Amino acid sequence: MADMDPETNTNTAGVEEPLFSNLDLFLFSLIVGLVIYWFMSRKQPEPIPEFKKLDTPTPTSRETSFIEKMKKTGKNVIVFYGSQTGTAEEFANRLAKDAQRYGMKGMAADPEEYSMGELARLAEIENSLAIFCMATYGEGDPTDNAQDFYDWLQENDDEDLSGLNYTVFALGNKTYEHYNAMGTYVDKRLEELGAKRIFDLGLGDDDGNLEEDFISWREQFWPAVCEHFGVEASGDESSIRQYELKVHTDVNMNKVYTGEIGRLKSFEVQKPYESGDHVAVFPTNNSELVNKLGEILGVDLDVVISLNNLDEESNKKHPFPCPTTYRTALTHYLDITNPPRTNVLYELAQYASDPKDQENMRKMASSSPEGKTLYQNWVLDSCRNILAVLEDMPSLKPPIDHLCELLPRLQARYYSIASSSKVHPNSIHICAVVVEYKTKTGRVNKGVATNWLKNQLVNGHKSTVPMYIRKSQFRLPFKASNPVIMIGPGTGIAPFMGFIQERGWLKREGKEVGETVMYFGCRHKNEDYIYQEELEEAEKNGVLTQLNVAFSRDQDHKVYVQHHLKKNKEHVWKLINTDNAHIYVCGDARNMAKDVQTAFYEIAEEYGSMTRTQATDYVKKLMTKGRYSQ
């Protein structure tokens, strides 16, 4: 405190007073005593369970120059990937592998691990080519691992990339407004900086058939590469292995991975979360499926193995954490429930003893109309996972190590957090539909994460799961006095439960809280009205100033959330145009989000006296200002 500073405190009597009086000391002792008593007597917090900490090796220094690595290993094709869920990375690996069949040598690369400022130096390598497999995430954003590359492209206007040959394959989803924004931007920006596009931008649509889009683009891309560089396809269609198997007979079991996600250290360090954030959950595959795979392949799943990269210079030493067992790999690390992609079928075809099976598997991996139709009908429409493929093709007996090399990694599942950290600091709530359905082949398929999470709740005991928090742009207004309009049918309500809890907490703290309006929708009140008690209680307590619920199938004509918006159009317009309300939309992007946006256009037209073009611009500006979040 300033008045206690010996350099500024003056003593007019000329006598130096002691720093603390007896009264000060008494009060200080009393306060300390009360604090100690409070700590000793207060309710103990929930104990945090202890997890086995991963014995992670000391990180080694990595080569950040992809140019030097390519020179050292004789590579001339580099495939960068911006990947959030693993698909772009998988496509990049397939393209890098393809290069060998066309007289070139390729490597897949994570732009986060290398200095992208070296792109101009690719001209130093003869017949060099950079391929970019770029996924778009969120509202037209780069993926986490491509963020730095995106920033670099934006900031370096003077970069000269005239010696760079490139092409881009973009991964996106047409139901979102900013379809393939990242891939389109990279393609355009590289050209602006002087790079030479050697093949047209490929656009993959996950709402349609992403695999088919990729295959069709790839089949035209490689002939264009051959023509540009004057090289020829080797004609060698045999399988190219990327990893070699090592079986461990004498290994320290403490060094064997048992399902840990090593890179994330998710059990050791956790970040706090805010309402609107996502939780990424690492699920576990059904043990019944894993055991059936072991039986049909006739292998001991508990053998300890490593799959080691044949390219010793690669940053990716193993396809999943090694050493481990086949059982652990199939349970924790590999995707065994999604329909296998065409490259997996192509590579496994050699292990079918029936020539007809071989022919069909290779046909499904081709871009011929007949092959595409067969893959669509037999694999995708029938929802056949790898086990179903093996069961329905008895002649197919691949070695399990090659199968493990080919299967994609089991990905984390992202959920909007359905709780507020202010109200529930030690737990995270998830709102999700448990997926279970019968396929055309009569099998019952179950969602990996939702069924696993459901089974974690044993006898009412709280469970712990491997997870991490991902920050989101979905945020409550900085000023609590701003009104909020939340539109979330079905499980789209998840983030809004966190918002409602937080607004209630702010009210209890004595803060001025603006109007909090909820639009929820489901099919039937008696079957699908999730969080009914909580929502009605929030309305009763004044936390929700207005609760609008649409039950689409409880009457002759269908009623959706957009109909309620239009019914309350005058109030909605006042909140937006006069009171500076923030709008949030969560749920089905294909139909609901578009219909809701149209409802806002119509409200702006009627009450703002705007044309449709002006109304569209008005809503776009709300989005730009962060007042309309989807």
Image (tube, rainbow, N blue to C red):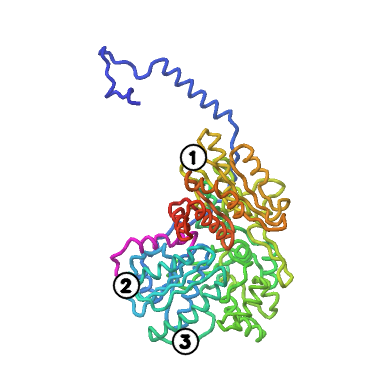
Q: Amino acid at mark 1?
A: Ser
Q: Is residue 32 magenta?
A: no
Residue 252 visible, this angle? no
Give the percent coordinates (x, y) of residue 376: 62, 76
The secondary structure type at the circle numbered 1 is loop
Residues shaded magenta: 136-161
Residue 475 relative to residue 188: left or right: right
Q: Amino acid at mark 3?
A: Ser
User: Which residue carries the number 3 mark?
Assistant: 234
Q: Outermost residue toward the top?
A: 13
Q: Earlier in the sequence, mark 1 or mark 2?
A: 2
The mark found on residue 481 in the picture is 1
Q: Which type of secondary structure does the marked residue at label 3 adopt?
A: loop
Question: Residues at badges 2 and 3 in contact (C-beta under 8 Å)?
Answer: no
> Could you tell me which secondary element the residue under label 2 belongs to?
loop
Point out the image quarter for the N terminus.
top left
Give the crowd class for mark 1: few <14, some 14-19, many >=20 residues within 10 Å: some
The x and y percentages for residue 170 are 47, 70
Q: Is residue 552 above or below residue 442?
A: above
Earlier sequence position, callout 2 versus callout 3: 2
